């Protein structure tokens, strides 16, 4: 079985992306990892080149900054990396620059890839998610956070990144048929130094909105304002080992009085049903579980 990884990145240093941790988290289960490094304003390329592994294969790309709707440029860059994956790969593992695959589940990932390798009905594998917010001690507890997403796909010409690169589709906008596996991705997109996070927030807004909209709607602060958030809860599990050094370097304070969580009525209903049955009503699903 041949397994390739793929990801894309741009300006990882200035926006403090945990891209090294992301890549290193999938290296143990990959024969190669393709990294599409976009034209950056910092030393992102040198950072990726510093990874001491013969599995790393870098392609340099130029982002189309005119793509300002729906995060489309992120899907375009994902597709560039995906296209560069070896054609004889049985599976392609996708990881974004603020995601980390937990090592506790790597054996499950390997077993699932082997189990479904020769099953033509399975287009991909679906992962569970934990979304962290503000600090490494808190995770999202509202239904607005997506619970699952596809992070392993076949290497096929009819599969492509969808919308803002959160997931994948095939053919004429068809959902992929997937198997849900017992494995977690940790998403750290909203955990970083507040200054870097504010810069990232303002910059990434350009991928969805016009300059006029940004001028009218985005407040240009020195630091990101964590106060306007949906409910979170204390994280009681273990972070991936590749994150330990980054977590130890954390140099900002973030705390919340969890007794004052205020759920919207629809969230309370959804969470009640989910805890009772495991099913979340009206959940957005960019896939078809088989």
Image (spheres, rainbow, N blue to C red):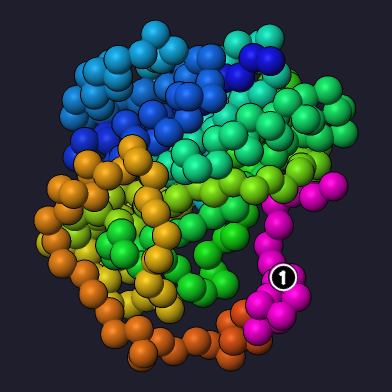
**Residue stretch in magenta:** 272-290
42 vs 127, left or right, is left
Q: Residue at x 50, y 87 (%)?
A: 263
218 vs 155, left or right, is left
Give percent across and percent down for residue 23: 40, 29
Give percent across and percent down for residue 6: 51, 25
Give percent across and percent down for residue 252: 14, 61
78 vs 253, left or right, is right
Location of the N terminus by quadrant is top right
Q: Is disc 1 surrounded by few (<14), some (14 to 19) or many (20+) residues within 10 Å?
A: few
Q: Residue at x 71, y 80 (%)?
A: 276
Judge whether residue 282 is colored magenta.
yes
Quadrant in the picture for residue 237: bottom left
Give percent across and percent down for residue 141: 48, 73
**From the viewer's perspective, is residue 14 above or below residue 119?**
below
Q: Is residue 190 something that shows in the picture?
A: yes
Question: Disc 1 designates what residue?
Answer: 278
Q: Residue at x 23, y 44 (%)?
A: 246
Q: Secondary structure at mark 1?
A: loop
């Amino acid at each position: 079985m041949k397994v390739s990884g793929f990801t894309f990145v741009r300006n990882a240093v200035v926006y403090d992306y945990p891209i090294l941790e992301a890549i290193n988290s999938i290296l143990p289960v990959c024969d190669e990892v393709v990294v599409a490094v976009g034209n950056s304003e910092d030393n992102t390329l040198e950072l990726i080149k510093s990874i001491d592994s013969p599995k790393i294969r870098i392609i340099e790309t130029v982002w189309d900054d005119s793509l300002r709707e729906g995060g489309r440029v992120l899907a375009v860059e994902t597709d560039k990396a995906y296209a560069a994956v070896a054609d004889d790969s049985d599976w392609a593992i996708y990881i974004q620059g603020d995601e980390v695959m937990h090592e506790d589940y790597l054996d499950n990932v390997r077993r699932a890839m082997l189990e479904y390798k020769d099953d033509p009905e399975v287009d991909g594998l679906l992962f569970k998610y934990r979304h962290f917010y503000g600090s490494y001690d808190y995770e999202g507890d509202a239904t607005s956070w997506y619970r699952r997403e596809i992070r392993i796909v076949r290497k096929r010409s009819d599969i492509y990144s969808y919308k803002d690169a959160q997931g994948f589709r095939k053919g004429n906008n068809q959902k992929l048929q997937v198997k849900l596996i017992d494995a977690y991705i940790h998403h750290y997109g909203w955990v970083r130094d507040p200054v870097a996070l504010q810069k990232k927030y303002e910059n990434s807004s350009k991928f969805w909105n016009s300059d006029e909209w940004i001028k009218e709607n985005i407040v240009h602060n020195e630091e990101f304002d964590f106060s306007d958030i949906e409910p979170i809860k204390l994280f009681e599990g273990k972070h991936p080992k590749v994150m330990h050094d980054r977590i130890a370097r954390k140099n900002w304070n973030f705390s919340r009085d969890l007794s004052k969580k205020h759920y919207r009525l629809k969230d309370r209903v959804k969470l009640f049903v989910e805890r009772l049955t495991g099913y979340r009503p009206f959940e957005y699903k960019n896939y078809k579980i088989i």
